[in-house]
Image (cartoon, rainbow, N blue to C red):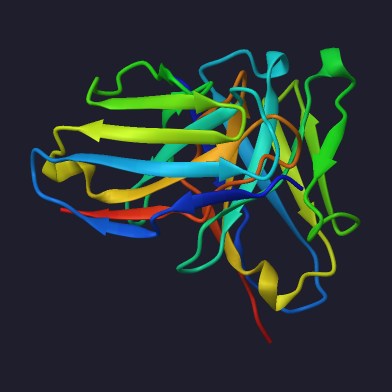
Amino acid sequence: DIQMTQSPSSLSAFVGDRVTIACRASQSISSYVNWYQQKPGKAPSLLIYAASTLQSGVPSRFSGSGSGADFTLTISGLQPEDSATYYCQQSFFPPHTFGQGTKVEI
Amino acid sequence: EVQLVESGGGLIKPGRSLRLSCTTSGFTFGDYAISWFRQAPGKGLESVGFIRSKAYGETTEYAAPVKGRFTISREDSKSISYLQMDSLKSEDTAVYYCARQGMVDDYWGQGTLVTVSS
């Protein structure tokens, strides 16, 4: 299976900060990376797909970049409602594996 | 409005079987693959597997921990996908989610809790 490694596992930041979460795949996966936000007790919510395409309705402060094996999720201008756990997922080859998650505290 | 609702979870003894359902509405079910995921208490997300649409032969893919024990199926006439779980183990304890898979798993259900314990 393709391994997805996220870093950091957690971070603490202030409202208005810019935060970056990294995700590295164990092999090249082109741009087949998606990012999800999950709040406690809720299902994950899609933020970004195909590495950099913003899902409809997602605020523009979220952005994604990368290709090959290295990817990044950036939140520019952190808001209180962004407190959540964020996961990367590869959809290049089944099973569609996830990173271990990054908990963002504000 | 796209909706997916999982049901069928509960407390089950190790070694027993359980079938989960994913009832959907708001989209043309037959046009999409359906994915199943799980999340153990306090842990991250894990792929269980998925079933492709009829156009792709309704073929399935499974993650290694469940291969040979779990079976995903679909009933397009009812817009429902099923996750049949056999030979359950304590490590299968998790919230199970289904999701619509287009280019990506874009809509998810709210999940159903399966607890495997004697």
The residue sitting at 68% across, 67% down in the picture is B92
The residue sitting at 84% across, 69% down in the picture is B87
The residue sitting at 31% across, 33% down in the picture is A74
The furthest residue to the bottom? B118
B118 and B32: which is toward the camera: B32
Residue B72 x %, y %: 79, 42
Tell me how many marks there are. Answer: 0
- Residue B67 shown left or right of residue B104 in the figure: right
Residue A47 x %, y %: 39, 29
Q: Is residue B100 above or below residue B20?
A: above
Q: Is residue A14 above or below residue A90?
A: below
The quadrant in which residue B82 appears is: top right
The quadrant in which residue B70 appears is: bottom right
The quadrant in which residue A22 appears is: top left
Residue A27 x %, y %: 70, 39
The furthest residue to the left? A15
B54 and A102: which is toward the camera: A102
The residue sitting at 30% across, 23% down in the picture is A58
- Residue B66 shown left or right of residue A21 in the figure: right
Residue A43 showing in the rendered view: no
- Residue A84 shown left or right of residue B44 in the figure: left
Residue B61 x %, y %: 82, 39
A65 and A93: which is toward the camera: A65
Residue A95 showing in the rendered view: yes
